[in-house]
Amino acid sequence: MSFLAIYAEQDASRPQLITTDGARIASELEAEGIRFERWTAGCELRDPTDQAQVLAAYADDVARLKLENGFVTADVIGLTPDHPEREALRGKFLDEHRHAEHEVRFFVRGSGIFYLHLGERVLAVGCEKDDLIAVPAGTAHWFDMGPTPDFTAIRLFTNPEGWVANFTDNDIAARFPRHEALAEHFTQTAAPHSQESA
Ligand SMILES: CSCCC(=O)C(=O)O
Ligand SMILES: [Fe+2]
Ligand code: NI
């Protein structure tokens, strides 16, 4: 299930909070100006890796986001575990970077972890199917799709050129747990719960 792990930027060894409770995830992120929502598709997708089918199935939601945020284009990014360039594509998002525009991603299927470097904290957001996350322009972040990526996400842009990753040259991402170390929180069967450490 989706999760949120909050760290002090100086201590990647011990999260201050780990929660899989959707309402708690949304409220903690909202406090930082990060939009986190859960949608459900109007219809089941025959092929959730097909760009045209995905955009058609979510046409109303995409249209609403375009109206609300001035986005003009949407595309679909997706990988399956056998993708020949999975390592290179994983590496593309794995270092801390910023974008000149909002980064809105909706997960149609699968999962991935966004790490948001906000002030003196790092918030790792494990996103799964039906999660929408909106990272404001200029937010330092990185994304880890893991070693066997398996996700499809809708991306919205005001200006595709705006999405260019401007790397911060901060090696902070290398000091934080990678997908492999956090993926257990995606699969846990326990009821949504929060663990806080003093
Ligand atoms: C889920 S799309 C890949 C992540 C991304 O777009 C980014 O971090 O810039
Ligand atoms: Fe990004
Ligand atoms: Ni847990």
Image (cartoon, rainbow, N blue to C red):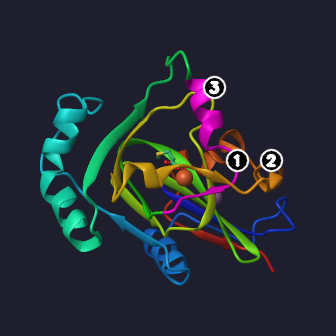
Where is residue 35 shown, x and y percent of the image?
42, 72
Q: Which residue is mark 1?
A: 95
Identify which residue, 146 or 120, lies in the foreground: 120
Where is residue 120 shown, x and y percent of the image?
77, 76
**Is label 1 within 8 A of ligand 1 (CB to nearest ligand atom)?**
no
Whether the residues at callouts 2 and 1 have beta carbons within 8 Å, the answer is yes
The picture quadrant where one finds residue 146 is top right
Identify which residue, 66 or 33, lies in the foreground: 66
Residue 96 falls within the magenta-colored stretch:
yes
The picture quadrant where one finds residue 66 is bottom left
Looking at the image, is mark 2 or mark 1 nearer the viewer? 1
User: Residue at left 37%, top 60%?
Assistant: 132
Q: Earlier in the sequence, mark 2 or mark 1?
A: 1
Where is residue 161 shown, x and y percent of the image?
43, 49
For the residues labelled 3 and 2, the Cα–Cα distance comes to 15 Å
Please indicate whether residue 190 sits to the left or right of residue 22 in the image: right
Give the numbered dot on residue 87: 3
Looking at the image, is mark 3 or mark 1 nearer the viewer? 1
Name which residue type carries label 2.
Ala
Please indicate whether residue 82 sits to the left or right of residue 52 in the image: right
Q: Is residue 99 above or below residue 150?
A: below
